[in-house]
Image (cartoon, helix red, strand yellow):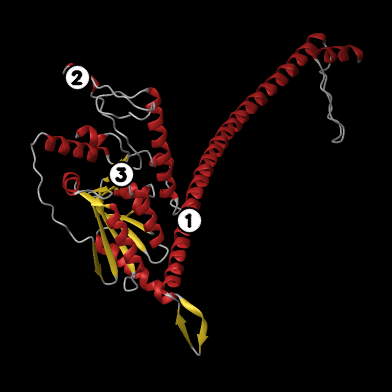
Amino acid sequence: MLDLLLAHDSWLIAPDALDHLASRAEAYGRGLIKEQPTSQIPLTEVREGIAEIAIHGTMARRPNDLTRWLTEATDTEQVLEAVRLAAADDSIESILLDIDSPGGSVAGVPELAEAVAEASKKKPIYAWTGGRMASAAYWVASQADGIFASPSARVGSIGVVVPFLDRSRAMERDGLKMEVFASGKYKAAGMPGVSLTDEQRASIQADVEELFGDFKSAVLAKGRKISEESMQGQMFSARQASARNLSRVEKNKEAVRRNLKAMTGAAMAMAVDKTKVGKYRTMDSTEETLQAAIERLQQLEASQSALVDFQASLDTARTSYEERIGKLAEDVAALTELAEQLAIENEQLKTKAEEVDARIAARAAQIAADSGAAPLTVSPVGDDQPQKALSAAEVWNRQFAKR
């Protein structure tokens, strides 16, 4: 039974939940646990115009009584029918999906998600979890107008898994050998006691990637900006999920109900027909009213996303300017230090020049004294005639020229 549970099927489920199902199946197969009657909780409850539809436990399509008990399953077809009925009922103003599920098998999930998407065109739909909203459950929730999680909830596990238990060596140790005669190279893939071939592995992986692509497309269909990195099978805390745009944090389900009720009431109040009768205006139809509210909500979400992007660009620009200002401050400090150093060196050169001039004058006077000639003086010229510096040789020669 364990082989049959794990093989031949693709799963949209958190890995620990799949392991739990396998353990229960194995325990049941060994007679360690016995089937117990399951209590049926109401699938839909209507309060104050809001239809609450429960999606609890593993999600499966048309599970029998044993499967329902063994996997603690919710029938996706029953949930789909409940969503359609709620969408068609004029006495119901909005829908709340109450989810606590690790996901489940693939069968029936895309169809249920599509039903939620169609229902959201008629009236507002929110998805809420106080526990887990994983994999298949998140696929369905992603088609709602809003996704909310309690602070302690877990959200995510966007991915597909096809586990395969290869028991061929165990059977060999028991002296058993499975031989399979099949019409094609893929027909026997996943048979208990038979290993997969490389071609069978490639085929299964191709199926996984195709389904994963559909999953991601559905998640992004409502315009949520979720990165590729956030869709790699991870489970997130409610806070992390909010930061990655998978969901929003809300303290409890009653708060979500109030938000949903307020949204519906505001939509009904703001939507009016263009035709006026005196000073009064008639209300639009329910579908038109809710469609206008949904469009307005999407506009607000888009505006909020644009503001977040704009704030991020401002933060980036501010960081860049701060770095540039810091660099300029360093350059100014370096130039100030260089100017101070040059001023010091200039004073030193000036002092040296004065010392050289003094030494030249003293030497010239000494030469004149030794030769008995009058000291040579150079009269300053007019302000408009620059003085010409005399070399030591010229000073010497001029003394003899005057004799």
Residue 340 at x, y = what percent?
Answer: 58, 32
Could you tell whether 139 is left or right of 380 in the image? left
Q: Secondary structure at mark 2?
A: loop
Q: Which disc number belongs to residue 176?
A: 2
In the image, residue 317 above or below residue 342: below
User: At 15% across and 34% down in the image, what residue appears?
Assistant: 26
For marks 3 and 2, give the one nearer the viewer: 2
* Dot 3 and dot 2 residues touching (CB under 8 Å): no
| Inter-mark Cα distance, 1 to 3 | 25 Å
Q: In the depicted view, which residue is nearer to us: 141 or 325?
A: 141
For marks 1 and 3, give the one nearer the viewer: 3
Residue 220 at x, y = what percent?
Answer: 44, 49
For marks 1 and 2, give the one nearer the viewer: 2
Residue 209 at x, y = what percent?
Answer: 41, 36
Q: Earlier in the sequence, mark 3 or mark 2?
A: 2
The residue carrying pointer 2 sits among few (fewer than 14), some (14 to 19) or many (20 or more) residues within 10 Å by Cα, namely few
Residue farthest top in this picture: 370
Q: In the depicted view, which residue is nearer to us: 242 or 92?
A: 92
